[in-house]
Amino acid sequence: MQYPSTIKYPLRNRIIFFNQTLNVKIVLVIDRDNDLGVKAGIRSPIIGRQSNLISAIKLAEVDPEDSDLNTIFGAIKIYDELRRDGEDVEIVTVCGDQKVGVVSDSKIAEQLDYIKEKLNAECAIVVTDGSEDEFVLPLISSRFKIDCVRRIIVKQSKTIESTYYILKKMFEDPKIAKSTLTPLGIILIVYSISLFLKSPEIGVGSIVLVLGIYFLIKAYGLEESVEEYFSTLKKSLIEGRFSFIVYIMALIFVVIGMVQGIYAVWIESFVTSEFVTLATVFINSSVWWIVGCGAFISIGKIFDSIVERKDFRKFISIFLLLISTGLILWGFSEYFISREITILFKSLIGAVILGIVGLIPLKYEAGTHRE
């Protein structure tokens, strides 16, 4: 990947740099979520005091409260101090991507390699705002000797108004709001419904279930899939697609499945308190509703692909594999409850047949791509 190699002036929201080949120490600023690019339209790496100053000013014009702004100014201060002491030093800002994780860190790694080659730098002073930017320290330490890690923390007055303001700004950040307000909102809704039904004990169990699902989503990084579903739902509504109805049906199915499962567990809890039994009852009562949810989403994707003249074989495979999975879960749960081996045997045979049939379109698609 080619990066701009000079810095003197801004040109169409892009910072240009003059080549530098000296062996220098670098003062390194990391913007892992690419606020500079998203908010100010600046592409990285940003090399040199003047370029970083211009970038900070452009970011300040757009969002004067961004923590990356203070980090850059803090790095400039460190740079000036080192220059006064006679050290051969350069200041560099590297940006990642909005998709924090593999995508952003890969971009940062590429730019660090570029900087190491162009500046012939051996050591770095890393300047951060003390947030998620420090997760990339292993990437830096594998390329440069880290002399120091400096955190830039903005001073705040310790008043109630200031605390309220800080919390308000935090919750205005989409990432923080989604991570904290979403589960809190669902918990309040679930508990209020249980109070309305005069069954607070169901509400407590439902809250635990909601939190469990939320933690699983976070643990396996499924947030993007959930966001994609609601984004597709919104897009289908705006464009007047038939798939909008299908996606709504899918959402209704998953809600019904959860309610059905919780109700079945509540009834069974009067008979036994054994966790395995209650979990099996929940799966048995809700599995087909949840499979139906996935099936409706697959059908919606198939409709969208047909309208957009795209290949939809993948979604047919997903549809069949979902039903196959449902048969396996239902068969085992039914066997555990009723001890009917015949039901388990038939469901497993059906699951295997559907699984094999479902894999055929995927293999055909893979063969087409190879050709």
Image (tube, grey):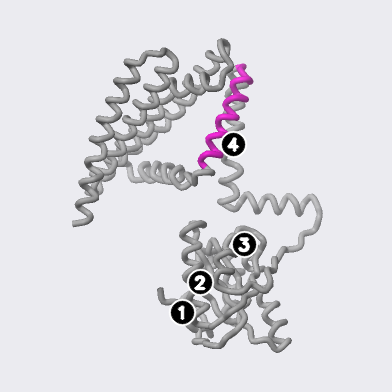
**Of the residues shown, which amino acid type is indicated by label 1?**
Pro
Quick one: SS at disc 3? Answer: helix
**First-in-chain label (3 vs 2):** 2
Question: In the depicted view, which residue is nearer to us: 118 or 235?
Answer: 118
Any magenta on residue 194?
Answer: no
Q: Is residue 117 left or right of residue 359?
A: right
Question: Marks 2/1: CA distance?
Answer: 11 Å
Up/down of 251 relative to 12, above or below: above
Question: Marks 4/3: CA distance?
Answer: 30 Å
Whether the residues at callouts 3 and 1 have beta carbons within 8 Å, the answer is no
Q: Can the viewer see residue 57?
A: no
Question: Marks 4/2: CA distance?
Answer: 36 Å
**First-in-chain label (4 vs 3):** 3
**Of the residues shown, which amino acid type is indicated by label 2?**
Ile
- Which residue range is magenta in the image? 198-217
Q: Is residue 347 left or right of residue 214?
A: left
Q: Which residue is mark 1?
A: 4
Mark toward the viewer: 4 or 1: 1
**Of the residues shown, which amino acid type is indicated by label 4?**
Gly
Mark toward the viewer: 3 or 1: 3
Q: Which residue is mark 2?
A: 42
Disc ID at residue 185: 4
Quick one: SS at disc 2? Answer: loop
